[in-house]
């Protein structure tokens, strides 16, 4: 098959994927989104011969709009624009999870500083303020006091961009010093890891320690439901354990990846241009191989439908 890789920068994740595709003798068309012009009726020449396009754009805006065009050209794209649009916006993400009955942190959205302050006071301290668009834990704030809330809200209000005037306020979920990242293809887990840190943010991009994690039946159920909620695809599903303290985790696992038994999980986010290099390094699963297995199956299924 001919796989188009839509990108703006080739990172370690893309290199792993490209290497696996080439090892299987698949043709690869690298499509630098920065150099493309997307016409409403005529597709760029780069899309002419590809069987599937894999969106690996770094910028959210490029990802959302480019996948809309690729889909309009009747070229299969992973992930599709519906998934990209929902996952790229935390408000849409939260609404989709809630509508699907997936446990997710309680969240308010407000459009003025005064209304946001009311939400913060109702949630109590600490609570969390997040940008509606963003990744890698950037511009997220854990708010511990009214004075901190006032300063952060005033700062956001003066930043200018309309997205900073959408105040996404969320309850602070007590977690055992870690969260869980699951890479899934249409709801089927490829591999999972825990990301542990002394900081309240446990993103791998923030330097969190990673360990493999074995999903129980409840976690498997929620990964599938969360994937369906955002229309499926190649996704990173982020869960937090409920009812497990940091002391429980340390007592159960020592320095290893185990934990006490959680009462439940909450899914705080589903990511659509998911990074997997850290997961590939920490688990025994050949992550890029499993992703390419899934791509091959999708292309084969598409060929059968159109035959």
Image (cartoon, grey):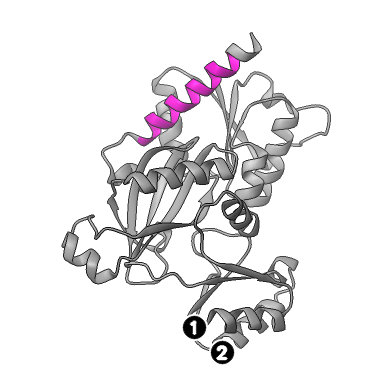
Dot 1: what SS?
Answer: loop
Residue 207 in sight from this viewpoint: yes
For the point 55% across and 20% down, the residue is 299
Percent coordinates x, y for residue 108 in the rendering: 63, 70
Residue under circle 1?
125
Q: Residue furthest top?
A: 307
* Vertical position of residue 228 compared to residue 203: above or below: above
Mark in the foreground, 2 or 1: 1
The first of marks 2 and 1 along the sequence is 1
Question: What residue range appears in magenta?
Answer: 287-303
Res 201 → quadrant = bottom left
Q: Residue at x 34, y 60 (%)?
A: 263
Task: Using the rendered image of the protein, determine whether residue 275 is visible from the camera's viewpoint.
Answer: no
Question: What secondary structure predominates along the stretch shown in magenta?
Answer: helix
User: Of residues 237 and 3, which is closer to you in this image?
Assistant: 237
Report the disc number at residue 206: none
- Considering only vertical position in the picture, is 30 above or below 231? above
Residue bearing mark 2: 146
Residue drawn at x 49%, y 57% is 103
Q: Alpha-carbon neighbours of circle 2 within 10 Å: few (<14), some, or many (≥20)?
A: some
Q: Is residue 235 left or right of residue 164?
A: left
**Image: 258 above or below 149:** above
Magenta stretch encompasses residue 291: yes
Do callouts 2 and 1 mark residues in contact (Cβ within 8 Å)? yes
Q: Is residue 175 magenta?
A: no
């Amino acid at each position: 098959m001919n796989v188009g890789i839509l990108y703006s920068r080739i990172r370690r994740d893309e290199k792993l994927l490209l290497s696996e595709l080439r090892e299987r003798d698949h043709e690869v068309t690298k499509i630098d989104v920065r150099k493309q012009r997307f016409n409403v009726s005529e597709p760029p020449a780069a899309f002419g011969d590809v069987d599937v396009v894999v969106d690996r754009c770094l910028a959210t805006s490029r990802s959302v709009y480019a996948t809309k065009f690729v889909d309009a050209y009747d070229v299969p794209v992973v992930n599709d624009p519906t998934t990209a649009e929902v996952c790229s916006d935390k408000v849409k993400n939260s609404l989709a999870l809630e509508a699907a009955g997936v446990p997710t942190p309680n969240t308010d959205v407000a459009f003025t500083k005064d209304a946001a302050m009311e939400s913060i006071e109702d949630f109590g301290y600490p609570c969390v303020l997040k940008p509606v668009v963003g990744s890698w834990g950037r511009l997220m704030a854990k708010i511990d006091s009214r004075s901190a809330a006032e300063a952060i809200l005033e700062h956001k209000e003066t930043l200018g961009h309309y997205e900073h005037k959408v105040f996404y306020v969320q309850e602070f979920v007590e977690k055992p010093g870690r969260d869980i990242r699951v890479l899934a293809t249409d709801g089927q887990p490829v591999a999972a890891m825990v990301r542990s840190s002394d900081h309240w943010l446990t993103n791998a991009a923030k330097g969190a320690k990673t360990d493999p994690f074995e999903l129980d039946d409840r976690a498997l159920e929620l990964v599938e439901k969360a994937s369906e909620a955002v229309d499926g695809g190649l996704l990173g599903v982020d869960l937090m354990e409920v009812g497990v303290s940091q002391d429980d985790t340390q007592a159960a696992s020592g320095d290893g990846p185990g934990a006490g038994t959680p009462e439940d999980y909450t899914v705080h986010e589903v990511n659509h241009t998911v990074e997997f290099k850290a997961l590939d390094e920490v688990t025994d699963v050949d992550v890029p191989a499993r992703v390419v297995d899934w791509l091959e199956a999708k292309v084969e299924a598409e060929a059968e439908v159109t035959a």
